[in-house]
Image (cartoon, grey):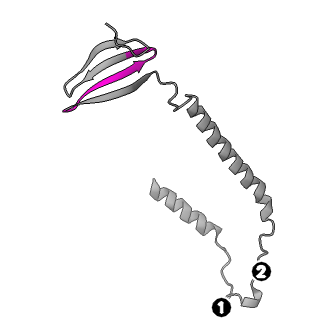
């Protein structure tokens, strides 16, 4: 398939070439002299692109601000909407921990060891241990 596309590209390039070869076989084509060079006007109309540039920068700034605000509110990709969290962790040594985890309005005291995680008790919201 790539070869066919390359072949079509070459055929298009050859078709666009000048089909009229020089009439005389001894005719020599010389490059243009420096005096014959066509001068290209400087881009004095560059300020016409300035509103587009300012508009693009304003659009990028607005999109960045919207993304930052949506993440702060817990929108797409935000963290404020998470209901599960770790409030505190205490190490007991040898890869053993006590963890206070919260889910919605519940607080749970968990024992974490390399082999398992065990619920020790459910804590009330004011921080005192329950029965």
The residue sitting at 30% across, 29% down in the picture is 90
> On the rendered structure, is 107 left or right of 111?
right
- Please tell me whether mark 2 sits on a helix, a strand or a loop: loop
Q: Position of 40 compared to 91: left or right? A: right
User: Residue tagged by mark 2?
Assistant: 39
The numbered mark at residue 131 is none
State how far apart marks 1 and 2 are (Cα): 25 Å
Q: Which one is in front, 1 or 43?
A: 43
Does the magenta run of residues contain 96? yes
Q: Main secondary structure of the magenta part?
A: strand
What residue is pinned by disc 1? 28
Query: For the view shown, which residue lies furthest in the top direction?
Result: 131
User: Left or right of 77: which side holds 61?
Assistant: right
- Mark 1 surroundings within 10 Å by alpha-carbon count, few (fewer than 14), some (14 through 19), many (20 or more): few
Q: Label 2: few (<14), some or many (≥20) within 10 Å?
A: few
Note whether 32 is above or below 64 in the view shown.
below
Quarter occupied by the C terminus: top left
Residue range (magenta): 94-107
> In the rendered image of this protein, does residue 121 appear above or below residue 6?
above
Question: Could you say which is closer to the camera, residue 26 or residue 114?
Answer: 114
Q: Earlier in the sequence, mark 1 or mark 2?
A: 1
Q: Quadrant of residue 40?
A: bottom right
């Amino acid at each position: 398939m790539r070869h066919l596309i390359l072949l079509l590209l070459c055929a298009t390039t050859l078709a666009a070439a000048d089909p009229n070869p020089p009439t005389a076989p001894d005719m020599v084509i010389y490059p243009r002299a420096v005096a014959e060079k066509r001068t290209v006007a400087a881009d004095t109309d560059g300020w016409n692109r300035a509103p587009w540039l300012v508009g693009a920068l304003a659009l990028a700034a607005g999109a960045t601000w919207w993304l930052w605000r949506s993440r702060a509110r817990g929108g797409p990709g935000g963290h404020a909407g998470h209901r599960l969290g770790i409030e505190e962790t205490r190490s007991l040594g040898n890869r053993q921990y006590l963890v206070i985890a919260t889910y919605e309005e519940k607080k749970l005291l968990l024992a974490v060891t390399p082999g398992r995680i065990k619920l020790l008790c459910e804590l009330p919201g004011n921080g005192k241990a329950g029965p």
